[in-house]
Image (cartoon, rainbow, N blue to C red):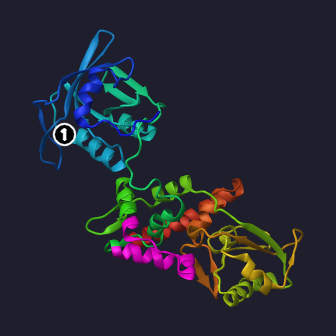
Amino acid sequence: MKNRKPPTESMIPDWLNAGKIKLAPLRFTLLSTQPSVTSRAVGARESTWDFELRGEWAEQSAEFLVEFKSQSTPKVFADALLWCQTASLPSDRYPLILVPYLRESQIGELEKAGISGVDCCGNGVVIVPNRLRVYRTGAPNQFTSGAPIKNIYRRNTSMIPRVFLAQPQFSDLTEVLTEVNQRNLLGQATRATPMTLGTVSKALKQLEEDLIIERRPQIRLLQPAKLLELLTQNDTPPTVSTRTRLKVNIPFERLPIWIAECAQRARIPVMATGLSSVAKYAVMQREEKLSVYCPDASKLLPLLEAKQTDRFANLELVETSEHPVFFDAVETDGFRWASCVQTYLELMRGDQRDRETAEQVQDAILTRVMQAIR
């Protein structure tokens, strides 16, 4: 069962005394809540450590100066790690980071840096050179997240991180908001409630905590590859109401402009799915069938005068009202294709051949972003 909140600094002494913070075979004893050791990290002012601990094992012991953080977001963790790497401390003391929860990747970073770190869930790594090395992972996170938005990389909110792969630098929060709403094809077409400034602000805070962007002096993308990875990890297929397969007597090369003209008369937006847009970004042979997203197939079908069939279909209407799939559509000769990011995400859901093709799209995305950053 998860605790409602992680322990605060004032609660840590009680947790230590109760034996709640441990990393077998180590046993920790609190020595001081106000260590007299003052350190200066590179580029930082003098500061004191939060706690002093003794770790004991097999009739041996070592003493640690602790940098405690009540959160373990990537940014908070990175700041704590930098402090422990660069702060001066006595030769008989070792630095140790204490946070509510450590991800396995963070424990790997600690081990690589030779810095000890433990969490309040039973994970961590403790390194005493030439004497001890303990590594523990796998204990679940017992604490609720303090993130302002449950998951910014999924569903509608994902349009905020996605916009940085289209435009990696902004002057201020309002410019980000404007760009997100302008690139939201479905929102523009249906006059849906636009993204709000508050939602963008919360999402940017999380992106900053995740070290994806920096916000000073400008709002700027820092890790495009990491952002694409997070979008992929959190991607879910859109909710589809209906799939209608049709056979139309029109040459395949003319289908895009024909369906665009029909959609214009029906006054609804249509856009090729990511899988039907692959040729815009990569080399891949696909069957001659155009799949398009539309929010209301019933308005479009009467104008098509096409036969519904599962055999030899060359047009598929995929009915969905999820905004991210339409986000940042690319218009060519009057027809809209899926963005390179949407195309990449759809390919990554596919088989090995699709995922191999996704590597081409990924290269195109990252090359374009890096050129824009420079």
Nearest to the observer: residue 12 or residue 278: 12
Q: Position of residue 370 (x, y in %)?
A: 43, 67
Q: Residue at coordinates 60% horizontally, 60% vertically from top-left?
A: 359
Q: Is residue 64 above or below residue 191?
A: above
Q: Is residue 227 above or below residue 246?
A: above
Nearest to the observer: residue 129 or residue 152: 152
Query: Does the magenta segment cover residue 359?
Result: no
Helix, strand or loop for disc 1: loop
Using residue 350 as the reference point, say whether residue 361 is left or right of it: left
Residue 331 seen by the camera: yes
Q: Residue at coordinates 40% horizontally, 36% vertically from top-left?
A: 3
Q: Residue at coordinates 17% horizontally, 50% vertically from top-left?
A: 43
Q: Position of residue 285 (x, y in %)?
A: 75, 68
Q: Residues within 10 Å of mark 1 (few under 14, many from 20)?
A: some
Q: Is residue 72 above or below residue 148?
A: above
Q: Amino acid at mark 1?
A: Ala
| Circle 1 residue | 87
Using residue 237 as the reference point, say whether residue 314 is left or right of it: right
Q: Indicate the quadrant where residue 160 lies.
A: bottom left
Q: Is residue 113 above or below residue 320?
A: above
Q: Which residues are magenta?
A: 174-200
Magenta segment main secondary structure: helix
Residue 286 seen by the camera: no
